[in-house]
Image (cartoon, rainbow, N blue to C red):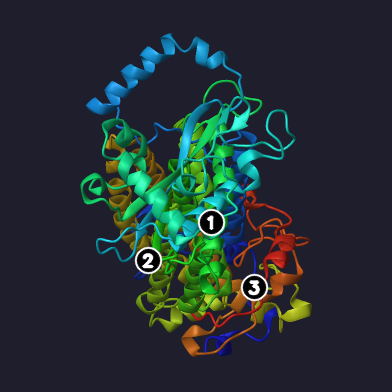
Amino acid sequence: SHRQSFPTDCSSTPAGAEALTLHRTMGVESPHKGASGSPRINAISKKLVYQPCTVCGWTLGIMFFITFALGVFNAGGLSEQSGYDWDISTTQAVINADMITSGESDVDDISISNSTERTDASYYITIQYNKISCNGENMFTPETVKAICETDAVVYNNLGWKGTGIMGSDKMGFCLLSNGECEQPISPSNLFYGSNHNFTCELLSDEEVAVASATLYAHLTTTAGELTYGFYVDKAAPTDGQTCWTRSMFKVGSPLRGYTGASSVGDKQFYKIQEWMADVQEDLQGFFGMKAEGFQALAGQSVNLGGVATKGGLDVNWFSIVMQNAEMMHTVANDTNMAVFSMLFVWFWIVMHTGSFLIGSLGMLQIVLSLPVSLFIYRVIFRIWFFDTLQTLAIFVILGVGADDVFVMVDAWVQSRDEVPYGGGSDEDEEQKLASKCDDKAFPVCCATCCCAGPCACMGHDPVRADWYVRRMEYAYSRAMKAVFNTSWTTAMAFFATAVSPIMPISTFGIYAALCIIMNYVFVMTLTPATIIIQEYYMEGTHGESSGEKQSSLPNCCWCCSGPNFGPFSDTVKGWTPPPPSKPEKVPIDEESKVSGWGVYLVLLRLPATSFRI
């Protein structure tokens, strides 16, 4: 084995600056397979191999700093929605609407100054009733009338409908006011229980229902009657004398207390009304037994997707533009919450594929942190402030792309073990020559007394190991860089292409998703290879791959020391001073690499050993 070739007597081996110079220059001009031929990639590979913790520290530090900067610039939250986000400004319909809005703005002084609470009918809740089995029979029976009344009562009896009082009450109400009182809902039940009934909904007799139904159909025979009562029946009712469909309507008033002017979609009053309607929605779902249970509730769904609202032989449906907006937001938010399960699965699969908890965790961290870093560029640099729930769905894109990039880099590193020969390949003489450059005076020995058999056993492989790791990293880095760049660039361009969309949310989503792809590429080419080196050299300490032997060496020693240049192939350590050189000039020491305190950082970073084998 390679370890058996080490000299046992370090004092008898060559010493001095020659060995130190060889150690420092190892891998610069390697003739072996694996060298990329690019000085830039060679320099990057040496940085990753010699100082992986420095690279990880700086990369993670920049990620967290930019994420923190989002809060400083107040750029991390969702933007406020408006009713015009999805409008296409060049379409004739939008142009016409803009002209109307512009014209209204010139005569809007009176309505804006209006402060009378809830006197404008701004929104509606419509409840539609369809008779499930309608074969030429009158849909109004004592049972169906009672069912209609009880359904309407769910909205009518909600505390938010009237509030705890009317004018000046402590609890805000939402009903449309007329002369200081809530307007009665437009409901078929008014025809049977009276126009001002209080929705107690007792069961009527057959005779009472028949008389009220006959009165309704009689009114439909005149034009004036049809205008008044046609709201309650389908279009065939005047001729057929019966209807299979009816509906109720609740008018929601604005301005709300404390506001001036009528509400419009997307303003602050709209969202207050939306909160109340969400409560009404829950009441209706509970009334019909439609609330989600079991796995659906666990997944964040509010309604049983298989549930049907039926009562008294009627199929019941309700609608409001405010409820629709709330349901859309809830659905998108619920899908976004599922990203947590997606992240856990992707993290688990990366750990399983690489066999490394460290690579899986830092790989997932770089994927997640690419989102706020991209958001910083998107908002602070590009000055695009629209960021809605749609943009957050980019997490699903970046999870797939980011995990693939990690797999490509790790697999390239694994392949490099077979493609790049260890040391001098089959040239055992060269390897023996490098291994013989071991001297306790020429090479620093890190904690030799606590975890190394001796200075030569600890440092004997470093020159060969350094050269091999650098050439492996060149091989893996150049292969992964091309493959990941091609996939990332084409994906980013596909998203950038959506920037030409006239629909603003889609256009901005494409820009943000493209930035996420680009930033993930940058991080996977910096953090991932450094993490691989840390995992293999620090966490595993596998130093006898070519002989099938796992040996204790410098990385394991470095858990108990810290030095100015802390890395698996450090040139200097704390407390070690190289001997005076034989020549007048001093051997230069790389000042940029003197970063103290990395021993503490690595102790904090150290995780339980995994089954990672490279």
What residue do we see at 36% from left, 67% from top?
31
Q: Can residue 130 be seen by looking at this rendering?
A: yes
> Callout 1: 10 Å neighbours few (<14), some, many (20+)?
some
Q: CA distance from mark 2 to mark 1?
A: 74 Å
Q: Report x, y in % for residue 138.
A: 32, 58
Task: State which quadrant residue 65 falls in.
Answer: top right
Q: Name which of mark 3 and mark 1 comes first in the sequence.
A: 1
Q: Which residue is mark 2?
A: 475
On the image, the x and y values in percent for residue 247 come to 40, 48
Q: Position of residue 251 (x, y in %)?
A: 49, 36
Mark 3, mark 1: which one is toward the viewer? 1
Q: Are marks 2 and 1 in contact (CB under 8 Å)?
A: no
Q: Residue furthest left?
A: 239
Q: Secondary structure at mark 3?
A: helix
Question: Does the rendering let one see residue 391?
Answer: no
Label 3: which residue? 555
Give the residue at x 55% y 46%.
277
Q: Determine contact: label 3, label 2, CB under 8 Å.
A: no
Please name the amino acid that badge 1 sits on.
Glu
Residue 364 or residue 291, whichever sits in front: 291
2 or 192, nearer to the observer: 192
Decide if residue 323 is on the left or right side of residue 178.
Answer: left
Q: Earlier in the sequence, mark 2 or mark 1?
A: 1
What's under tag 3, amino acid-wise? Answer: Pro
Characterize the local packing of mark 3: few (<14), some (14-19) or many (20 or more) Cα atoms within 10 angstroms.
many
Pointer 3 and pointer 1: residues touching (CB < 8 Å)?
no
Marking on residue 150? 1
As drawn, 523 above or below 299: above
